Image: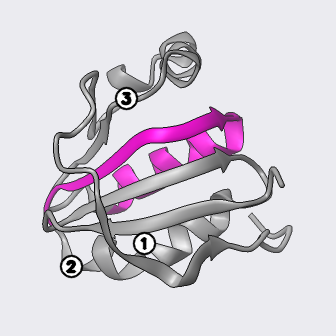
Amino acid sequence: MNDLLQVLRTATPRSIRLVGELDASNADGLVESLQEEIETGGDLVLDISGVSFVDSMGLRSFLRIATALEPSGKLVLQGPRRTVARTMELIGIEKLPNIAVMAEAPEEGMPEAAVPEGGVLPASGADG
């Protein structure tokens, strides 16, 4: 079940809620599923309060998203759990360009709709 990550749109514009584990099996799929939001530009908020685990590939996906947003916005990582926050702190993700980490979880966390259909990202291919 480690390869499942739900990507849920919220009622707040340009805010996406992630639920599950973000690792090598689905990190590329996360970037792909957010491509439309990335191309739209502007700040993008990822509510990661529902993410229970993130590995180096998951963190790399955050960096890829932030880099792609750089001309017109930044990536905001909101509400990480203690274990995820500690992993991010160890590599200094909040010091990387174009990434902001907000400790508090969002007040509005109810998802509106899932992306993609069913809300579960399949494990992606090994090209990455």
The residue that disc 1 covers is: 34
Residue 31, placed above or below residue 2: below
Name the residue that disc number 2 marks: 40
Decide which of tag 3 and tag 2 comes sooner along the chain. 2
When asked about the image quadrant of residue 5, the answer is: bottom right
Task: Tell me which amino acid carries mark 1.
Answer: Leu
Q: Nearer the viewer, mark 3 or mark 2?
A: 2
Viewer-side residue, 1 vs 122: 1
Looking at the rendered image, the disc whose residue lies closer to the viewer, 2 or 1, is 1
Q: Is residue 73 left or right of residue 22?
A: left
Q: Which residues are magenta?
A: 42-68
Q: Quadrant of the C terminus?
A: bottom right
Crowdedness near tag 2: few (<14), some (14–19) or many (≥20) residues, C-alpha within 10 Å: few
Mark closer to the observer (3, 1): 1
| Sequence-first disc among 3 and 1 | 1
Where's residue 65, x and y in %?
A: 42, 57
Which of pointers 2 and 1 lies earlier in the amino acid sequence? 1
Q: CA distance from mark 2 to mark 1?
A: 10 Å
As helix, strand or loop, the secondary structure at mark 2 comes to helix
Q: Label 3 vs label 2: CA separation?
A: 22 Å
Q: In the rendered structure, which amino acid carries the disc numbered 2?
A: Thr
Q: Percent from the top left, x then y, of residue 109?
A: 27, 51
On the image, numbered disc 3 is attached to which residue?
96
- Identify the amino acid type marked 3: Leu
- Residue at 80%, 70% in the rendered image: 127
Magenta-colored stretch includes residue 64: yes
Asked which quadrant contains residue 123, the reply is bottom right
Mark 3 is surrounded, within 10 Å at the Cα level, by few (under 14), some (14 to 19) or many (20 or more) other residues, namely few
Between 33 and 127, the one nearer to me in the picture: 33
